[in-house]
Every structure is written in C-alpha cells, then in structure tokens.
Image: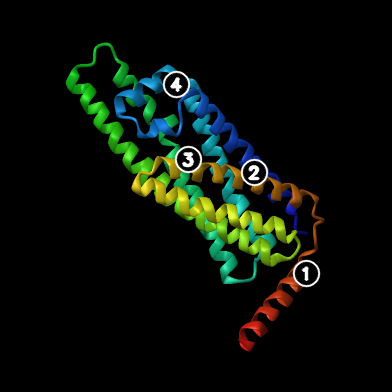
Amino acid sequence: MRRPQGTGTLLIASAVLSVGGYLVLGTQFGWPAVLDEPASRALDAFVESAVWVRFGFYLFLLSSLVLVPAAIGLHDHLDRRTTAGASVAAFGVLGAFAQMLGWVRWPITVPGLADAWSDPGATATSREATAAAYDVLNGYAGAALGEHLGWLLQGIWAVGVAVLVLRDGRTPTWFAGLGLTLAAMWAVAVPTATAVGLATLELWGLNAYTAWYLWLAAFGVLLLRRPQAPVAQADAVGDDRAARNRVSSTRQ
C-alpha cells in the first residue's frame, strides 16, 4: 500500500523547521544580511548569540535533511514510472544535500573560528588568519555550495514538483498553478541575486521562497487527507497516464 500521509508529514515538518530556522536566525543573528558582512562583524555576531545561531542552523539542516525522503516520496506518489519523474526526484535529493553541506558549517566549523577570533590572547596575525579562513569557508560552503548549487538544484526540483502536481490531476488546478508560479519566481530570483549581488532581488526571492514553502506545507496537508491507494491500482493509473501521453506525442 502506498501512504501519501507519510510524505505529507515530511513536507509539513520540513516547512515548520525551515520557518523556525528563519525566525530564529532572523531575530538573533541578522540572517541573511549577516552573510554579506565582513568576517569581523559576522564572527562577533556569532559569538554574541552562538547558542541561538547553532540552534537555528540545525533547524535548517534538519529541514533540508527531511526533504530527501520527501522528494523520493513525491516521486512515488506523483510520477514513479517515467524518467522525468525520477529526474525531478534526483534534483530534489541533490539540492537537499548541497544545502546541508552549506548549513553544516555553522554549527560544526564556525564555532571553532569564533573561539579563535574571540580568544583574548590572539594576536593580530592570528585574527587575520581566522578572518581569512572564515571568508574562504563562507565563500565555498556558503556561496558556492549552499546558495548557488543548492538553490539552483532545489529550484529545478520545486518547479518540477509543481509541474507534476499540475499534471497529476488530483489537486485543484489553481493550487497547482500557484505552486508553479511561486517556485518559478524564487528559482530564478534567488540564484540570480546571489550570483550578481542584488540585495533587493535576493530579499524578494527569499520572500517568494518562504511563500512557496508554505505552499509545500499546504500540499503536505492535502496529502494527509488523500486516501492511500493499492500499488496495483496506482500503477494502473500511471500506465494509463503514460499511454495517453504517448498517444498525444504521436499525434503531435
């Protein structure tokens, strides 16, 4: 038996964890603006609220981790019999892992840099070395892996999921269309803004991302209310849908 309720629970959990991390870091750490600050200010801010910062990024880390089984579950419930469906799921899994590689630096590696930075016995040379190490780590794990690769892969997954929901036919068209619109908005805005350094566009994209995450949670609620279907019945539906697609392609 297929259980969409499990996938729905994972989507809701990921959204709750992500929003929680956003609220904690936004109020205690000045995130995401602090990411553009020089090492001296960022490390000082980390030292002032280290416990809250680590807690907030652990929430982000768990949010991305939960998306791995959620992406696989959505593939199973929306389109488990085509290459396109498998490709969408792969982007979701890879995007979640890329984001986790970005998040994990904050609770694991940055605390050591913060301790070295705030050490009363540190010399000017050692502090400069610590700041340089932070800048390199922030540029690679943050900008390259988390923000560029992670956002890009997850953006492709978000658009792909919305398209699959639209094609699935078991969800209201307006709701699926809303998800596709929000996903397309942030999937373009956030990677573009981080690549060229447009703070206004990045903020606009992050707001769209938050709205999309709420949509994802709402879709999780719909999955919780969706009755489970026997595998044979679901496969038959998938075969029928694939056959219709092949016939449509032949006619075109």
- Residue type of the residue flagged with mark 1: Ala
For mark 4, what is the residue? 50
Which residue is at 65% across, 66% downward?
A: 80
Residue 93 in view: no
> Quick one: label 4 or label 1, which is nearer the N terminus?
4
In the foreground, 80 or 191: 191
Q: Secondary structure at mark 3?
A: helix
In the foreground, 87 or 210: 210
For mark 1, what is the residue? 232
Determine crowd level at label 3: few under 14, some 14-19, many 20+ residues with C-alpha closer than 10 A. some
- Distance Cα–Cα, label 1 vs label 2: 32 Å
In the foreground, 145 or 197: 197
Which residue is at 29% across, 20% downward?
A: 117
> Quick one: label 2 or label 4, which is nearer the N terminus?
4
- Distance Cα–Cα, label 1 vs label 3: 46 Å
Residue that extends furthest to the bottom in the rendered view of this protein: 251
Q: Is residue 104 above or below residue 167?
A: above
